[in-house]
Amino acid sequence: MSNDTTADIVIAGAGIGGLTAALALHARGITSTILEAAAELRPLGVGINIQPAAVAELTALGLGDAMAATAIPTREHRYIDHTGVTLWAEPRGIAAGHPCPQYSLHRGELQTLLLNAVRERLGDHAIRTGVRLQGLQQTGGSVRVHAHDRARGADVMFEATALVGADGLHSVVRACLHPEHGALNGAGVIMWRGLTELDGFLDGRTMILVNDKRATRLVAYPISVRHAAHGKALLNWVLLARTGAPGPVDSAGWDVPGRLADILPHVADWDLGWLDVRAVFERSAQILRYPMIDREPLERWGQGRVTLLGDAAHLMYPIGANGASQAILDAVALAAELSGGGDVPAALERYEHGRRPATTAITLANRKMDRGERATSTRPADDKAAELAAITAEYRAVVERRRPGS
């Protein structure tokens, strides 16, 4: 085993949270090295939303222009039924009074702009691809990170002042810290996702949320400024359908292929009028399938000089469009605490104390909002509007950490 001298902080995972953490630490004068298991970083995935609070933090890191060049500033969420009737709508982002937009963009685009910024500011050496973390060992004044370098075919060891587990759904760092708390909870819902190019989509800045009487749901929104500049819309869509009872899920991944034949029966009686939903699915170049899952919130994330961030810390339902945003907020909070100097374990304690209650509340709020939106499916249209307004107001209050109605 070789001993690779490394920077102050080792970050496991070059996803959105890990890359943001490296940039936020660098902005405060702290060096870091990112260990990424994948041999090559490629722009994978489909669309995501970044909420205004997270956009504000990325803008403060100098990424505002880069995001504006690729992302759609979402203006409205529009709730409709499977016949195309609008039930209720609410403004989002700047239209809702926030100082920053809510951005909708391709996950790979965001990861790429973060990656480019890390390489430009920290240097290519800051990211070690093809290095899979295998274990960790804490000493009195450091943490030893044991990994395997696939390119060199050798085991390597990094010594750092802290280790941040930003290694996602299948986090090795989390498994080392909490081997008994790895169970995945399934909602009994399958999600199919894809991207479809259209000649246009409403005003180009609206997200639709469709719900039928069986609580089958479609969420769809445009994600590309470049397409919009040519009069097109690159539509990100996700169809959610209950296929079983809630319960444990053995395994899950984000890039499992899905089949058109499995989707179409769920929308056989849909007719939105202005949007051919069947054609949206049929024209998608790729369909991805995965279960809707989360994990029970941890009572404690880290230990000593090791902590967690993003999905590794708080995997949540993709309801409310907050997963990536909370990872970004984690990263900035972590950097702020570590920049205070002094005792590293104490700084990580402060980071967790500030972030864990908030993300636990959002994880539980996502579950509650999912149940609430499903429960509206059989209500009369007038009742649906009032209930949807109440559900979203309560959810925003949790995310923004304020009292409902304030």
Image (cartoon, helix red, strand yellow):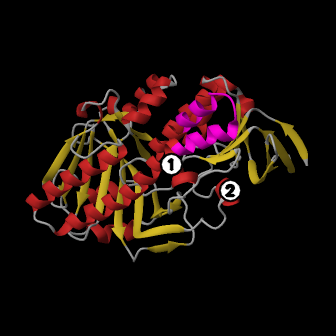
- Which residue extends farthest right? 1
Q: Is residue 58 left or right of residue 368?
A: right
Q: Does the magenta stretch include residue 334?
A: yes
Q: Which residue is drawn at 53% across and 67% down?
A: 184
* Sequence-earlier tag: 1 or 2: 2
Please state if 209 lies on the left or on the right of 305 as rendered: left
Q: Residue at x 38, y 74 (%)?
A: 243
Badge 1 is on which residue? 356
On the question of residue 116 being in view, the answer is no
Residue 351 shown in magenta: yes
SS class, disc 1: helix
- 329 in relation to 220, above or below: above
Number of residue marks = 2
Magenta-highlighted residues: 331-353
**Which x, y percent locates residue 199?**
28, 41
Q: Around disc 1, counting alpha carbons within 10 Å, would you say few (fewer than 14), some (14 to 19), or many (20 or more)? A: many
Tell me which amino acid carries mark 2.
Answer: Val
Q: Position of residue 79 (x, y in %)?
A: 21, 52
Look at the picture and state if 341 lies above or below 51.
above
Q: Residue 23: percent from the left, percent from the top? A: 60, 29
Q: Farthest residue toward the bottom?
A: 245
